[in-house]
Amino acid sequence: MRPARRRLVAALTTALGLCSAGALAQSLPDTENGRYTLSPAADGMLRLDTRTGQLSTCSDKGNGWACYTTPDERAAFDAEIGRLQQDNERLKQAVDALQKDKDSLKAQLAARDSVAGKIDEPLPKADSLKKPEITTKDGARKLEIPLPSDRDLDRVMAFLENAWKRLLDLANKVQKDVTGEDKI
């Protein structure tokens, strides 16, 4: 053989050897021993996948063995913890925003010229009446009693109307109970 051809064959052999070494270094197929660990259980077998940590229960249902993945409670707990942490962060941000709004409103109230809710004169009470005054006119002492306002008269009349209606309703009920007829 020629020297160039020998070098080519040597290079191909080396490359083939390196490729086959890489193929041997790969993991074993799923069916090989080592990936799954089986342990006896009350209703069959427990199968543990040593690569993923997934646990399955295997049982013979009469027509062959079947393995069903057991729910991973840890993953569910981790997901719930993550959701609660996100909710907690969202609520903390909302509280911070509300606190800033509250502080801003306090600053606006403090910056007002006058005190909020205060006026110079107190408001009169709605049902306060003027006191009678004793006056002297034409040399004689007279007692002047102030008349109620129209608003006060309207309130009294509304009260009396409601009382009269209730009294008539009560009398009608009594009349119906006694005679069974409506006469008033």
Image (spheres, grey):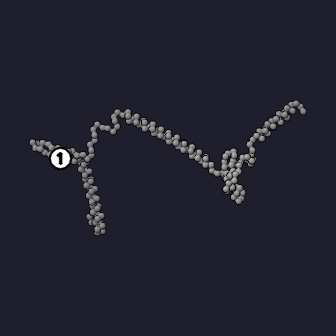
Q: Position of residue 131 (x, y in %)?
A: 20, 45
Q: Quadrant of residue 62?
A: bottom right
Q: Which residue is farthest top? A: 3
Residue 80 visible from this viewpoint = yes
Residue shown at 22%/46% (left/top)? 129
Q: Quadrant of residue 184?
A: bottom left
Label 1 Cα crowd, 10 Å radius (few <14 / some 14-19 / many 20+): few
Q: Nearer the viewer, residue 139 or 22?
A: 22
Residue shown at 36%/34% (left/top)? 112
Relative side of 179 to 137, left or right? right
Amino acid of disc 1:
Ile
Q: Which residue is farthest bottom? A: 179
Q: Could you tell me which secondary element the residue under label 1 belongs to?
A: loop
Q: Which residue is mark 1?
A: 145
Q: Position of residue 133 (x, y in %)?
A: 17, 44
Q: Which residue is farthest right? A: 1
Q: Establish if 165 lies above or below 10.
A: below
- Image quarter hosting the N terminus: top right
Residue shown at 10%/44% (left/top)? 140
Q: Nearer the viewer, residue 120 or 86?
A: 86
Relative side of 92 to 49, left or right? left
Q: Quadrant of residue 110?
A: top left
Q: Establish if 109 lies above or below 172.
A: above
Q: Position of residue 177 (x, y in %)?
A: 30, 67
Q: How many marks?
A: 1
